[in-house]
Image: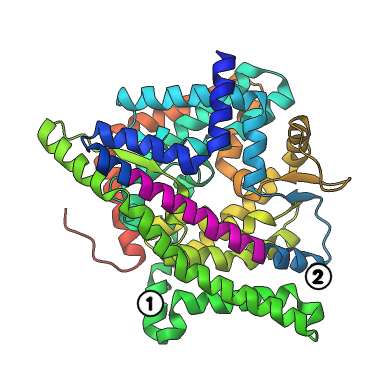
Amino acid sequence: MEAFISAMNTVFSTFGSVVIVPVILFVIGRFMGLDNAKAFRSALLAAVGLAGFSLVINSYSGIVAPVVNQMVENAGVNLPALDTGWQSTSVIAYSSTVGILFIGVAIALELILFFARWTDVFMASDLWNNYSFMVWGSLIYALTGNMWLAMACMVTQLLYILLFSEVMAKRWSTYYQYPQCCMTAPHHLESTPYALGMNWLLSKIGMNRIRLDANSIQKKLGIFGEPMFIGLIVGLIIGILGNFNALAELSSWGTITSVAVNTAAIMAIFPKVGGIFASAFTAMTDAYKAKAAKSGAGRDWYLSINDAAGYGEPNTLVTGTLLIPVMLGLSFVLPGNTILPMADLCALPYMVEVFVASSNGNVAKSLVMGAIWFGLGLIVASQLAPTFTEVAISTGFQLPQEGVYIMSFGIMCHPLIAAIFYAFWSQNPLIFGLVIAFYFVLYLIFKKNKATIVDWVEENALISTGAEVPAA
């Protein structure tokens, strides 16, 4: 069995999500009644969209990352835990013993729970993001040496994420306009209870009256309010801060203008790439509706797709980009923080999708929610950097220099999923037993009141931007 799982892990690591996900979508398309040509076309569009996401993001990251690093040097701070990015963290997770074993468990469990109708989310279509669970399981194993405890931690996190994804499925699908699709990335979905509660609270104190979103900004400022122009200004600010000590040099202004133009470019290009990816699901959506109508079962299920699908939505891009200097500044002043966000700052538009969707695109609310949650995450995850560095070294990772630790801001600085980890790390059966029991309580409450809860989420999202709430 271990040899089979290891081989499967090798295949997945070799081909990556750009190939594996479209293959899964092709199979799903055929299962839903599409002929070979339509199923293949949908899969190919998904592959092109995912490849486009990767090309655009990697290109932009390569331009902005050195400037962000320069901002850090200019600030003169000494934070020993360096953020090396989700990419390196995912490689480490898939290279660990725990990761190899869990990927088989995760696939089987996700399929069983879906076909047994425990969940209405088909999470197995986004296999790649299971690495987020593997990170925490690898830490448990490194700290305790207990493989069963590590597995129990990852399975519990998976169950919580499936529940949260089902709570958010309609909201995410509606907001990002991917019919019957949802997002299940664990490192984003874990903020669901906080996002929904905080959105409600911010509305109660009047922040829903602050109509700050890409459309309202554009209406008030014309061309100066377009996401492309906002990207230009934010990129200009980042570039100036990164080159603040060398503004008299012509080369610095070359870097500044390059960052500004490329930030504007990603604001303009990414929605178009997102449109290609979205078109992959048109035929599947039609097939889904026809199959549901014919069967009469009327099961309302959602297909998990990659979190990159929401990255380029204008309000998401604006919120994530504005949070780059905010989170960098917070890391300098937060007491107890040892983490220096670097590589994953460019991933902030991924990280805010739940906040943006739950507030229906209210940028002001999303900024507040993101700054608080990720700031807390920095503090919560700070003490884990030495242990994760040990795990990374055990898989062959080379440290950039002695005397530093590594971790991922985008994957590990998330309070709720970290709290589940801490419960299992305690090795106290009462503590992690309560965490498991609490899941079943939440699950039963949600299943019994699913329609009411989903409607409440929609209603509060629409209130966030002053949109009309449909009559019951």
Residue furthest toward the top? 1
Which residue is rendered at x = 50% and y = 47% of the image? 188
Read off the residue under disc 1: 216
Report the magenta residues as a range: 42-64
Residue 407 pos. (x, y %)? 71, 44
Magenta span includes 45? yes
Residue 352 pos. (x, y %)? 50, 56
Magenta span includes 21? no
Judge whether 164 appears above or below 172 on screen.
Answer: above
Q: Quadrant of residue 27?
A: top left
- Amino acid type, mark 1: Ser
Instruction: State the predominant SS element of the stretch in magenta.
Output: helix
Q: How many numbered circles does the render carry?
A: 2
The colour mode here is: rainbow
Residue 74, numbered label: 2
- Whichever of callouts 1 and 2 sits on the residue coming sooner in the sequence is 2
